[in-house]
Amino acid sequence: MPGPKNTDNILPTSSQLTFRDHLDHLAARFRIRRGKHRVAPGLYALGSPTADSPVFVSANYTLSFDALRSVLKGLDAYILVLNTHGINVWCAAGKGTFGTDELVNKIEETGLKDVVHHRSLILPQLAAPGVAAHTVRKRSGFKVEYGPVRAADLSDYLKTHQATPEMRRVRFPLKDRAVLFPVELVGTFLPLAIAVVAVYFLAGLSPALATASAILAGIILFPLLLPWLPFKDFSVKGFILGLIVTLPFSLAIALGQPRDWVSLLSAVLLLLILPPVTAFITLNFTGSTVFTSRSGVKREIYAYIPIMAILFGSGILLTLTLRVYLWVGRL
């Protein structure tokens, strides 16, 4: 087979992931060097591709790029990496960085027309929201072919270039959901610690434990229980989860000693303050899942954030008023 005409700007890569690659993946999962997990945009050669070799398109997020190249073992191919600013395919397509303009620009910048004879690109299916295939073909001459949802299905897909219904099916199993919470846990550890200590000195041990439980429920339990929590909106799911984890602490305060109006009001205020906190945290996962859309997230923010703010603000104000009242009463 004849080789490509233009090889000056083609970068080499391999399907073999190194120890350093795995360390990078681990660091990304734990929010270490956030924003630095990216590869240089451009055209990469996997193996010894010819002018007739397939061209795959990926984001420049290391986990996306590595997931693609690692399943192409033994295949000679090109990988066109778009500049998604270190964001994965799904999120970048929603934000527009894995989009039509960027794809066309990269085709032109890399001189792809001079590298391959054919005019076909294989994109991940989750890139479809950001790429208008007909526009790409009109502007660049390249046909967009959407591969399967998961890179792991590429080897079977390439046998026929026809995706089965199972390949098109978006799955989000427990394993995929579980890898989400370390990022949020690391990012909220310091605010969590400050909040728990502040509540402990202001209201005591039980409210402090309730605060920690409500925050951790939003970070850890929510992604794990996502499919089974009732209702569609993440905010409502999160509010219900917050009620569930806060209720035992609230009942303990209400039924403890002394059983007076102060204990009862404190218990109610706990239910007023903490479920909105859990609900707010759960909104962080809207961009990490395939359970919602960009328009759905915007609708949720406009609909529920004001309600969360009112409930939380009212609860904090009433709690401070109660504490001042009790403090004055002791004078």
Image (tube, rainbow, N blue to C red):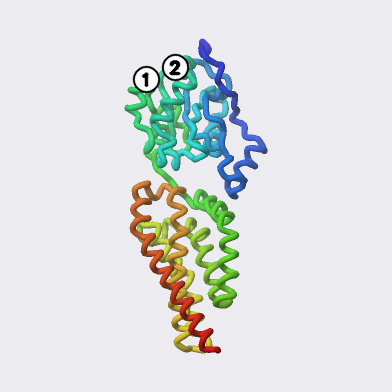
The kind of residue on which mark 2 rests is Lys
Horizontally, is 93 left or right of 209 in the view?
left
Mark sitting earlier along the chain (1/2): 2
The residue under the point 51% across, 58% down is: 219
The residue under the point 36% across, 60% down is: 304
Point out the residue furthest to the top here: 2
The kind of residue on which mark 1 rests is Gly
The answer to whether the residue labelled 1 contacts the one labelled 2, judged by CB atoms less than 8 Å apart, is: yes
The residue pinned by badge 2 equals 113
The residue pinned by badge 1 equals 141
- Where is residue 138? Give x, y as percent: 33, 22
The residue under the point 65% across, 42% down is: 23
The residue under the point 60% across, 42% down is: 25
- Where is residue 143? Give x, y as percent: 37, 24
Q: Would you place residue 18 above or below residue 326 in this image?
A: above
Task: Report the disc number at residue 122.
Answer: none
- Where is residue 103? Give x, y as percent: 43, 28
Q: Camera-side residue: 81 or 157?
A: 81
Q: Would you place residue 329 above or below residue 26 in this image?
A: below
- Measure the alpha-carbon separation of dots 1 and 2: 9 Å
